[in-house]
Amino acid sequence: MDVVHVVKRPKRGTGAAASFKRHWQLYLLVLPPVLFFVIFKYYPMANAVLAFKDFNVIQGIWGSPWVGFKHFRLFFENPIFWSLLKNTILLSFYLLLAGFPIPILLALMVNEVRNTRFKRFVQLVTFAPYFISTVVMVSIIMLFLAPRLGFANVLLSSLGMDTINFLGEPGMFRSIYVWSDIWQTAGYSAVIYLAALAGIDPTLYEAAKVDGASRFQKILHVDLPGILPTITIILILNVGNVMALGFEKIYLLQNSLNISSSEVIATYVYSVGLLNANYSFATAVGLFNSLINMILLITVNSLAKRISNTSIW
Amino acid sequence: MASAVSVRPKQKIRESASDRIFMFFVYAILSIIIVLVLYPLVYILSSSISSPLAVTSGRVWLWPVDISFKGFATIFKTPQIMTGYANSLFYTAAGTMISVILTIMLAYPLSRKTFYGRSFILIMVTFTMLFSGGLIPTYLVVKELGMIDTRWALLIPNAIWVWQVIIARSFFQATIPNELIEAGELDGCSDWKFLTSVVLPLSKPIIAVLVLMYAVGQWNAYFDALIYLKSDKLYPLQIVLRSIIIQNNSNGVMDPSIQVERAQLAELLKYSLIVVATLPVLIIYPFVQRFFVQGMLVGSVKG
């Protein structure tokens, strides 16, 4: 051991060249993943100039003529623009308002349970739907809400009520989407709050007990303030994703009857871009969406930083 | 936890009436939640092993009625579904391997303090969470690479998830002490040797997390297959499910000689398919749940 202490460290360079020489194996290791990001993330970003061109296959992306903001103008002037924006925002905010508090309430309740087995069982059960794929989730929704044979309608008619074509009603689309989402992800989202609750200083609980606080008061004055930073961060992430609604589930739930409330920006990009091969226009719409999303995330993050000193960067 | 347990007997005596009412509601609400979450799952499982007639006449409420395995028998006789199953197994195995290897190749160097340029690479990687070129530009890149309608399209373009890189990097930073790295360097151990003989054996928990998350993601994925694949023989199970359950295309699935029962069987088949597609994941899940929770928590610690 003594020898190790005596041996002088090899002289370290600090610059790029020295680091490269010493760690060439690490650089070699990092090369394929970096190439991955360049090819599949950054190259497409460069390809997004498509939005400012009239794409044709023969000339390719870079050879096609520039048209400036033509596609953006076409999109903003199209009457569908307002309905897409409205559908996207309404669905997102509904999801945020209903879906954000429920995992917090769930975690607070689970945290009160002292019976370890029951506690574990609740977590096991509520976490499970998270592993169901989107396709299966939508399949389950469709089977339960099917016009004639679905569980909901069998129940309605056995109670002597009229059956409802749930998925054909534009007015029900948002509720179906949001509540099935909560069913699927609330248990998963609660885990992060439970971890935060477990990290609260136990002396605070003892102090609350000495002060004669009831369980409810303890939740209000110890638990909630204790997990507030976590709540803020998750809220920032959720608000930042308001425009990035999951395309997959909406697309699968969509049909010609509910399309007036189920067509959002992401599904529109898919149908215009890939199904109708209108590449430039769809890229412009997608770019608009990405930009709004990025601006939202940055704004919310800096607001949170100013108000509560919590931020994600 | 230990203090909570030791406090319990005292608490029970002192618990006020209002606290007891409060706890009654907590238990009641949680029990209702358990029922709400479990009921659809049990209902589908029960339906899948009931007779076709019982399913279509709405006689299944909780437990199976006239137990029969016709739905499952049909699944195993349908080549389209079996091909999808085999494809999904392949995509899950191959995709998970590629993803985990690439993630570690990126996360490990990023965890090393002496790695010049790591903050640049980290920013470059995390920026892709904020902004993306979008669906069409990405599609065109995949097309340019000749990956459309090949198995590669499901394995490569989404191989690395940034979130997984962040989780793995925080893990390496927290578990591989600097002293160990310095000791390795003094002994003349190369970076590669250090990674394979010191870091990886110490990183089994994080490798488990990565494998599980990528595997579930790959097994459940359908969007990439939807946009990149055209041939039936390459379709993963999720696409087959979509066509049979959501788009109601059961033509060609069943033997025409059983025309009479066909409509009923088509309905039953949907339940059985859901079970077949979901059961593998849900059966393993209770045993590996702690890894998922671990993964989420490692990621939530700011690195």
Image (cartoon, coloured by chain):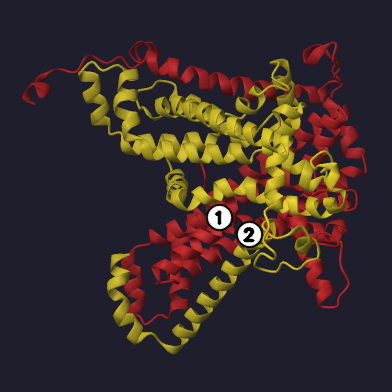
Chain colours: A red, B yellow
Residue with the mark numbered 2: B41
Q: Quadrant of residue B298?
A: top left
Determine whether the residue tagged by mark 1 lies in a helix, strand or loop. helix
Which image quarter holds the C terminus of chain B? top left
Q: Quadrant of residue B65?
A: bottom right
Residue at 49% x, 85% y: name it: B21
Give above or below for A99 relative to B135.
below
Query: Is mark 2 in CB contact (under 8 Å) with mark 1?
Result: yes
Same subunit, labels 2 and 1: the answer reads: no
Residue at 75% x, 68% y: name it: B59
Q: What is the chain identity of the residue bearing mark 1?
A: A
Residue with the mark numbered 1: A128
Give above or below for B56 relative to B147.
below
- Where residue A144 appears, as percent x and y from the top left, is 75, 60
Tell which of A271 and A157 is nearer to you: A157
Visible in this render: residue A303? no
